[in-house]
């Protein structure tokens, strides 16, 4: 018998697909459009990582399944080639980034061909080519015109190793998302995109999109909506007042001191001469800490008294003003009223500096939700504790005490009443705050699209005219960032010195480039419009194809790419360029692929190189193995033994296939029933992206077919189900069965409902022991299902109507008895 020659077979089919344009979609004529998207890869020169392949294979298997279900599946691919990772690699190997990029692209696309995905290769997109980044710059200009792009000096995140600023989303637990170096805060003027204008919409729309729940939760928390009030505190001995943001205006009677962030602009003004030295010292120390350190609950609180006092507006009490770094400059108003009895941080601070504590909310015994913490008493038995120590920290909702006009009210009512009171007296107002900050998009690096702005001494910042786009990235040899805070482009005089687009006078170009996440914030729409050279996007095209039907990718982009691209889509929608305001109808996150229980990493030497394995086992066997490893959401653990096992399975299918094709064992009906059950079950699994269980079911069926044989036609149905996973192998077997066309021109097989049913039995339904109905049901019917059917029977309803059902008894395979009173 002919051996399974994966090398020959896989190349043969890939060439045929290409020649016959099997996966090319006519975007305008497609009748049942289905946009199947996988995340934009940013490969290094080493190329395809098996982690990419893991994600892509799942996405592709789903796309192929939808194609077999009769959809016109558009599955594009491209390359996100701009960015620091590419640049750093070029620096490392001492080659020019342009040459490296060209090579990377070639190698990467070759690899992508080899894994056998159903890509439409006629619509690739590469972010570093002028015909793409021209439109990325156009996007900047649209933002600018809408007032959503602005330049501001502020305290931004600086990565000392990448020598550039980063957005808040790119700082993960204090470290650079890319190189893991600890970031610093630096005061610099940068370009921002006003994503905060869309905070409410970004939050609200989450309820309308079908995404992995955990990713939605991460976005909700990141947006961080919080409803509260702004309260005005007058400053004693000054004609001045300072606002605080609080989520608990009901605790105002318990505000016993006031805290400003060390960076608050009014600190210098109110600090007394006596306290000046200490305050200045403290400000210096605080400036060195990251926000993460400052807000870490486990860290000991520190602070300094300013010498000044604020007036609590509800009782006109003088309360001391401190500065402390647990209050952040960038949130709310950068100042708080401290309520130590009901806020954990304030509690610790008050204990440390011996500040007064007044309890104003007590737990509502019947419905308390918060936590009550009594500190272990430092006093021995018999000793008298000072009165302050029987105070308790209580952070939950409850009932007000010691609060004048709020006494006796429940927290939610107390909040409303206080807010009404504040608004009436003009001492405050209701306020909504978001944690989300504007997106800092400028980068002091070379390998990105130059930001299309020009600064004129006379006219200020001016946008480059749209017809002048692209602002081409000039060639330069020494593109290393120098850490001065200026991008490398600043070194090229001919690039920098230009004429002002407005007055024609001498002006200077912006030399920062934009964040690579800007490139990837809109690529999925460009895939659909690569044939338009005079505009970025074509609305008619987008109406037909957007939003993306299924997007599969990593969770690590939850608040990066997945949030940015939603924002950009919303803006372009509001500007009339995009018909819908959400980019992805469905998003499913996949888990991580690991190796022998550990994360793959170069230092451990356990990185799987797909090329090597493809050469040894063929792409189909690897695809099958990656899909079989575990549930997509959980990720999987690669083991070479498992890979070898899957290779055996692929060979077994080949063997059965060649037998059936030569008419051996083709007159048996014995596997028919299982075939139809499998068609039903595998279809249901694939709808839910449960590739591993689908493959397991096909393995079971293959055993039965091997044993008992099957009709040629039925074997055809079996391999169509395998086609999403092992497309080359199935094409070859399909043609061996005598078919002329690609198997992907076929339809997903239909099951015969009669054959998927289990044996039927007669289930007797009794009411109080008397037979009142008989139902035909599957022999294996579950208890719940049987009881439900019994109670829904029209005949039974008559007997049960108006009575109370006391008990329902189920006897497997026999009867249901309903006991009524
Ligand atoms: C008084 C109070 C009493 C508070 C109480 C809480 C409990 P979220 O939910 O995160 O919005 N806060 C306000 N601005 C702050 C800043 N810049 N840095 C640090 N903390 C700040 O939290 C809002 C609460 O966090 C506010 O409500 C304020 O403390 C504090 F029993 O005000 B609260
Ligand atoms: Zn000018």
Image (cartoon, grey):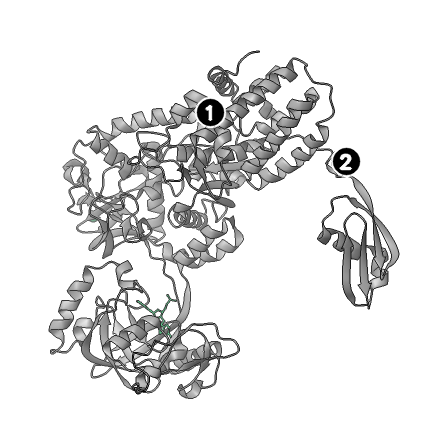
The image quarter containing residue 716 is top right
What whole-number distance in Å separates the C-alpha atoms at marks 2 and 1?
A: 37 Å
Q: Which mark, by number, is residue 754?
A: 2
Is the residue under label 1 in contact with that under label 2 (CB below 8 Å)?
Answer: no
**Residue at 75% of width from left, 39% of height from top?**
758
In this rendering, the answer to whether 218 lies above or below 48 is: below
The residue nearer to you, when weighing 165 against 624, is 624
**Residue at 34% of width from left, 53% of height from top?**
148
Q: Residues within 10 Å of mark 1 (few under 14, many from 20)?
A: many
In this rendering, the answer to whether 89 lies above or below 246 is: above
Image quarter hosting the N terminus: top right
Q: Residues within 10 Å of mark 2 (few under 14, many from 20)?
A: few
Under circle 2, the secondary element is helix
Q: Which residue is mark 1?
A: 619
> Residue 783's x, y, as percent?
72, 52
Outermost top residue: 1
């Amino acid at each position: 018998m002919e051996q399974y020659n994966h090398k020959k077979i896989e190349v043969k089919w890939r060439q045929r697909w290409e020649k016959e344009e099997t996966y090319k979609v006519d975007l305008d004529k497609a009748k049942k459009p289905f946009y199947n998207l996988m995340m934009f890869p940013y490969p290094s020169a080493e190329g395809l990582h098996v982690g990419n392949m893991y994600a892509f294979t799942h996405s592709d298997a789903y796309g192929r399944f939808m194609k077999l279900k009769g959809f016109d599946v558009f599955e594009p691919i491209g390359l996100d080639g701009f960015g620091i990772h590419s640049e750093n690699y070029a620096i490392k190997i001492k080659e020019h980034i342009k040459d490296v990029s060209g090579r990377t692209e070639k190698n990467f696309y070759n690899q992508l061909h080899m894994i056998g995905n159903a890509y439409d290769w006629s619509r690739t997109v590469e972010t570093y080519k002028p015909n793409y980044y021209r439109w990325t710059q156009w996007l900047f200009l649209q933002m600018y015109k809408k007032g959503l792009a602005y330049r501001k000096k502020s305290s931004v995140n600086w990565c000392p190793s990448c020598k550039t600023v980063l957005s808040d989303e790119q700082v993960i637990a204090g470290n650079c998302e890319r190189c893991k170096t600890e970031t610093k805060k630096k005061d610099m003027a940068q370009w921002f995109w006003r994503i905060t204008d869309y905070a409410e919409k970004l939050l609200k729309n989450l309820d309308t999109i079908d995404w992995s729940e955990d990713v939605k939760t991460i976005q909700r928390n990141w947006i961080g909506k919080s409803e509260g009030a702004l309260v005005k505190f007058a400053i004693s001995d000054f004609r001045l007042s300072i606002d605080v943001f609080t989520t608990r205006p009901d605790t105002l009677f318990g505000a016993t001191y006031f805290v400003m962030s060390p960076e608050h602009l009014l600190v210098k003004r109110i600090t007394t001469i006596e306290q000046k030295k200490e305050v200045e010292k403290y400000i210096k120390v605080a400036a060195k800490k990251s926000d993460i350190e400052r807000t870490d609950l486990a860290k000991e609180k520190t602070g300094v008294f300013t010498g000044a006092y604020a007036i609590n507006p509800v009782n006109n009490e003088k309360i001391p003003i401190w500065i402390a770094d647990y209050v952040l400059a960038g949130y709310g108003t950068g100042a708080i009223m401290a309520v130590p009895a009901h806020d954990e941080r304030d509690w610790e601070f008050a204990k440390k500096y011996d500040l007064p504590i007044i309890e104003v909310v007590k737990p509502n015994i019947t419905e308390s939700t918060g936590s009550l913490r009594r500190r272990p008493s430092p006093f021995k038995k018999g000793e008298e504790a000072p009165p302050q120590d029987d105070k308790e920290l209580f952070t939950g909702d409850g009932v007000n005490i010691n609060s004048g006009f709020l006494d006796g009210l429940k927290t939610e009512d107390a909040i409303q009443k206080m807010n009404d009171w504040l608004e009436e007296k003009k001492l405050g107002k209701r306020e909504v705050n978001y944690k989300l900050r504007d997106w800092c998009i400028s980068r002091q690096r070379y390998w990105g699209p130059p930001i299309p702005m020009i600064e004129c001494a006379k006219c200020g910042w001016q946008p480059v005219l749209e017809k002048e786009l692209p602002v081409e990235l000039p060639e330069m040899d020494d593109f290393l960032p120098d850490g001065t805070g200026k991008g490398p482009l600043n070194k090229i005089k001919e690039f920098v010195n230009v004429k002002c687009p407005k007055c024609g006078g001498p002006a200077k170009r912006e030399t920062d480039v934009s964040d690579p996440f800007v490139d990837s914030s809109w690529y999925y729409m460009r895939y659909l419009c690569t044939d338009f050279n005079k505009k970025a996007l074509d609305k008619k095209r987008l109406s037909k194809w957007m939003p993306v039907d299924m997007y599969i990718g990593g969770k690590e982009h939850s608040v990066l790419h997945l949030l940015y691209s939603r924002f950009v889509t919303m803006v372009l929608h509001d500007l009339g360029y995009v018909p819908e305001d959400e980019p992805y109808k469905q998003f499913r996150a996949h888990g991580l692929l690991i190796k022998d229980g550990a994360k793959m990493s170069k230092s451990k030497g356990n990185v799987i190189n797909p090329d090597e394995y493809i050469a040894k086992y063929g792409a189909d066997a690897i695809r099958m193995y990656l899909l079989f490893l575990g549930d997509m959401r959980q990720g999987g653990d690669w083991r070479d033994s498992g890979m070898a096992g899957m290779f055996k399975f692929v060979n077994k299918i080949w063997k059965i296939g060649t037998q059936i094709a030569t008419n051996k064992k083709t007159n048996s009906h014995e596997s028919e029933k299982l075939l139809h059950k499998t068609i039903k079950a595998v279809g249901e699994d694939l709808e839910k992206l449960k590739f591993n269980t689908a493959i397991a079911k096909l393995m079971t069926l293959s055993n039965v077919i091997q044993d008992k044989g099957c009709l040629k036609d039925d074997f055809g149905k079996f391999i169509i189900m395998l086609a999403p996973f092992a497309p080359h192998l199935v094409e070859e077997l399909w043609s061996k069965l005598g078919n002329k066309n690609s198997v992907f021109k076929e339809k997903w097989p239909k099951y015969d409902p009669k054959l998927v049913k289990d044996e039927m039995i007669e289930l007797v339904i009794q009411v109080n022991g008397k037979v009142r109905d008989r139902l035909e049901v599957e022999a294996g019917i579950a208890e719940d299902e049987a009881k439900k059917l019994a109670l829904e029977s029209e005949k039974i309803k008559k007997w049960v109507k108006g009575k109370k059902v006391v008990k329902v008894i189920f006897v497997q395979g026999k009867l249901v008895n309903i006991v009524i009173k």
